[in-house]
Amino acid sequence: GRGGVMEALLSESVAHLCARGKGILAADESPGTLGKRLKNTPQLSHLENAEETRRQWREILLTSDTGSCFGGVILHEETLLQSTKDGKAFVECLRERGILPGVKVDQGLEPVGEETVTKGLDTLSERCAAYREQGARFAKWRAALKVSDVLPSRECVEQNAEQLARYAKVCQEQGLVPIVEPEILITSDYGMARSRDVSTLVLREVFKRLAAHGVDLKTCLLKPQMVMPGSESAEKASAQEVARATLDVFDECLTDDLAGVFFLSGGLTEEQATVNLNELNLAAKERYAARGGQPWKLSFSFGRALQASVLKMWRGRPENAEACRAQSLRLAKANSSACEGEYNPPHPSPSDAGSTLVETFRGHSGAAA
């Protein structure tokens, strides 16, 4: 029956996404977020944030030869239906490279006091069916949790975990592998211990709700924050400390049947994201050797850390497209190596790319968020 067909589709997609050396490119910024990124990059501030500008930028990312590094690319629904300037559907460009198209299915954040929940559940089922018909094979939903001494509140953690679980269940019913993203916002001054406590609290609740809703973790992916101090904290953590703390939290909260973990890169430079991911895999190899290998794939679902230096290089000029595609591949290869613990410096990120990656709070700020 239909259930069996969907299950087979989910298993096939998740195996593809979790293949050795593969990660996911997050290229699903909303028009508002991408517009802010253009405006805040001096090389690009002259560009108009129009659909055609966004299409041109995404054409570069989606026609780079990154098939050996990316199992999937997360698209905004606008991009799912777009084509290259020569008229080839982006979905087709990805398919030719052996990359699965995914789609961001949440509809942004809405405020609840000083915190947020995510919009989009009411129309999710029919949208997922349509996205699947359009070629999508996996989906993403982002919750954003603000951290302070008193935040996130218990209610906020519960509401967001509940939404993530309901989303994941709907996706699986419609044949899309869900990526569950409970992002702990980095733009704050909390230290390592607080990051660890909040991560534990949030992930515990998320896994409790996933179980309650009967989500099959064998065809579900997690997109968490690495455990590290907030971007405004005086405390700094080494890659080794980040890896150790993150795996400690995972050991407490994650179950072994989860298919894979694809980290987000918020608040890290391109190089730090790669170095941390490499360290996580080295630490995991050592930690889980006695348990017959690590329970889950530890990979990347980076947005900024795979785009920042490419975007700067582009300058909105078609003649820079080739150089951009080459840089896109170099970044992809560095992270592909890191998800096997095999990364070797030097990093392909230009030395000046570091200062650009901590963005202003990507929480709720009216329509643009």
Image (cartoon, helix red, strand yellow):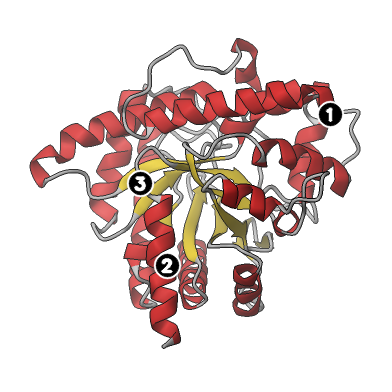
Q: Which residue is mark 2?
A: 10
Distance from the alpha carbon under mark 2 to that under mark 3: 33 Å
Distance from the alpha carbon under mark 2 to that under mark 1: 37 Å
In the displayed structure, 64 sits above or below 313; it is below
Q: Residues within 10 Å of mark 1 (few under 14, many from 20)?
A: many
Q: Mark 2: which secondary structure?
A: helix
- The mark that comes first in sequence, 2 or 3, is 2
Q: Are marks 2 and 1 in contact (CB under 8 Å)?
A: no
In the image, what residue occupies the spot 83% across and 32% down?
39
In the image, what residue occupies the spot 38% across and 48% down?
261
Say which amino acid is labelled 1.
Answer: Gly
Give residue 285's position: percent from left, percent from top: 21, 34
Q: Tell me the quarter of the image containing the N terminus.
A: bottom left
In the displayed structure, 239 sits above or below 259; it is above
In the image, what residue occupies the spot 51% across and 64% down?
160
Q: Which residue is mark 3?
A: 197
Give residue 40's position: percent from left, percent from top: 78, 29
Occupied quadrant, residue 231: top right
Say which amino acid is labelled 2.
Answer: Leu
In the image, what residue occupies the spot 65% across and 23% down?
309
Give residue 117's position: percent from left, percent from top: 60, 63
Mark number displayed over residue 316:
1
Classify residue 273 as left or right of residue 368.
left
Say which amino acid is labelled 3.
Answer: Asp
Q: Mark 3: which secondary structure?
A: helix
Q: Nearer the viewer, mark 2 or mark 3?
A: 2
Classify residue 293 as left or right of residue 183.
left
Residue 269 seen = no
Give residue 71's position: percent from left, percent from top: 47, 47
Occupied quadrant, residue 80: bottom right
Q: Are marks 2 and 3 in contact (CB under 8 Å)?
A: no
Classify residue 33 as left or right of residue 233.
right
